[in-house]
Image (cartoon, rainbow, N blue to C red):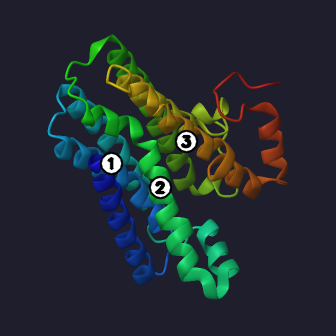
Amino acid sequence: MMYYLTLATGLWAYMSLWYLVSVWKKRNDVADVAWGLGFVLLAWASFFLSGTAGLRGILVSTLVSVWGLRLAWHIGSRHRGKSEDYRYAAWRQEWGKWFHLRSYLQVFVLQGAFLFVTATPVLIINRSAVGKLGALGGIGVSIWMFGFIVEALSDAQLARFMRNTQNRGSMMQSGLWRYSRHPNYFGEIVQWWGIWMAALGCAGGWLGIIGPLTITFLIVKVSGIPMLERKMAGRPDFEDYKRRTSVLIPSLPKN
C-alpha cells in the first residue's frame, strides 16, 4: 500500500508544480503537456521504487516513455506560438472568481487522478517480481506497437496538413483520417489495452484493466471525441465527413 501511496503523493506534487507553471504562463493548456510527461515520471518512479521490476518492467516503462515523450512534444509543438487552447480559454471566462481554485482541482488534480488510474497496469508490472515477458506480454507489446504507429502516423499526417496554407479552413479527410474521424485517439486506446495485456502475467494483473477502461471512457465519452465533435458540429463539410466516416475504429468510408 505504501508503494501506491508514495507514487500518488509524488504525482500530486508533480501536478501541483504544473499548476504553478500555468499561473506563471497564464495558460492552463500546459496541463496537456504535463499529461504525457506524467506517465513517464510515474513509470520510472514505480520502477525504481519497487526494487523488484525486471525485464518486463524495463520494457513497459520504456514503451510508456516513448509514448509520453512523443505526445508531450507533439502537443507542445502544436501550442507553441499560439494562444491558449479554446477549451481552457472558455473555462477561464466561465469560472470567473473561482478560476484558480477550479483550475487547480478540476484541471490539474483531477487530471493527475485520471493519470494515476490509467497507469495502473504499469504500476502493477513494476511492482511484480515477474521478469520474463511471456506470450501474453509479447502479444501486448505487439498491440502497443500497432497502436503507437497509428497514433504517431495520424498525428504526423494532420500536422503536415495543417502546415499547408492551402488547406486553411479545410478538414483533414485523407490518409488514416479517411477511415476514422479520430485515428490518433484509436491508436492511443489500443496502446493502453496492449499495456494491460502485458500486465496479465503478473500477480493481480487483471486488475489493471481499470487503466485501459479509464482512458477509453475519457476519450470516447468525456474530454476527447465529444469536445472536438461539438466544436466542429454544424459545419457542412464536417457533417458530410461524419456521415461517411467511422467515429473511432478505422473502417472503409460509406458512399
Asked whether 140 or 68 is in front, the reply is 140
Residue 132: % across, % down: 21, 18
* Alpha carbon distance from label 1 to label 2: 12 Å
Residue 71: % across, % down: 41, 49
Image: 44 above or below 175: below
Image: 230 above or below 52: below
What's the residue at 37%, 15% (across, down)?
A: 136
Q: Earlier in the sequence, mark 1 or mark 3?
A: 1
What's the residue at 38%, 27% (across, down)?
A: 204
Secondary structure state at the residue bearing disc 1: helix
Image: 201 above or below 161: above
Q: Quadrant of residue 246?
A: top right
Q: Earlier in the sequence, mark 1 or mark 2?
A: 1
**Considering the image in quadrants, where does the C terminus appear?**
top right
Q: In this rendering, which labeled residue sits more in front, label 1 or label 2?
A: 1
Numbered circle sitting on residue 183: none
33 displayed left or right of 166:
left
**In the rendered image, which residue does mark 3 sit on?**
214
Amino acid type of the residue that numbered disc 2 sits on in the rendered structure = Ala
Q: In this rendering, which labeled residue sits more in front, label 1 or label 3?
A: 1
Identify the residue at the far bottom of this view: 97
**In the rendered image, which residue does mark 2 sit on?**
113
> How crowded is the residue under tag 1: few (<14 C-alpha within 10 Å), some, or many (20+)?
some
Residue 117: % across, % down: 46, 46
**In the rendered image, which residue does mark 1 sit on?**
4
What's the residue at 27%, 47% (across, down)?
A: 3
